[in-house]
Image (spheres, grey):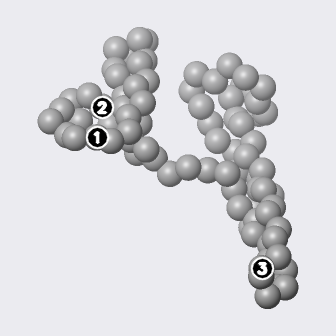
């Protein structure tokens, strides 16, 4: 398992790493618990959520349950993230 996953965001304004400070480190999280029969369990995972993106042209006519809109005024393109 890698120690960290570096995600690059084009227009990120928060703290970051790398030469341009546009990389965000995602570190793994550990969760431990005990089952009803006394077994100790541990899970290590990266807190990432799978999603898809589409332009407004490709999403026309689709019935979508959860959508978030991202507007890129520099390129005049609107993207929708599908959760």
- Judged from the image, the secondary structure of the residue bearing numbered disc 2 is strand
**Of callouts 2 and 3, which one flags the residue occurring earlier in the amino acid sequence?**
3
**Of callouts 1 and 2, which one flags the residue occurring earlier in the amino acid sequence?**
2
Which residue corresponds to the image point at 34% horizontal and 14% vertical from the top-left? 76
Q: In which quarter of the image is residue 80?
A: top left
| Residue at the disc numbered 2 | 55
Which of discs 1 and 2 lies nearer the camera? The answer is: 1
In the depicted structure, whether residue 78 falls above or below residue 47:
above
Q: Residue 35 carries which label?
A: 3
Q: Indicate the quadrant containing the N terminus: top left, top right, bottom left or bottom right.
A: bottom right
In the depicted structure, whether residue 68 falls above or below residue 83:
above
Q: Which mark is residue 79?
A: none
Which residue corresponds to the image point at 79% horizontal and 88% vertical from the top-left? 37
- Judged from the image, the secondary structure of the residue bearing numbered disc 1 is loop
Instruction: Name the side, left or right, on which 2 lies relative to 54.
Output: right
**Of callouts 3 and 1, which one flags the residue occurring earlier in the amino acid sequence?**
3
The image shows residue 33 at horizontal and vertical percentages of: 81, 71
């Amino acid at each position: 398992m890698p120690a960290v996953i570096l995600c690059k965001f084009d227009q990120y304004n928060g703290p970051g790493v790398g030469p341009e400070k546009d990389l965000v480190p995602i570190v793994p999280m550990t969760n431990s618990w005990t089952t009803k029969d006394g077994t100790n369990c541990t899970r290590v995972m990266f807190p990432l959520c799978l999603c898809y993106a589409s332009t407004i042209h490709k999403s026309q006519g689709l019935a979508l349950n959860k959508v978030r809109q991202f507007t890129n005024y520099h390129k005049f393109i609107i993207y929708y993230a599908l959760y």
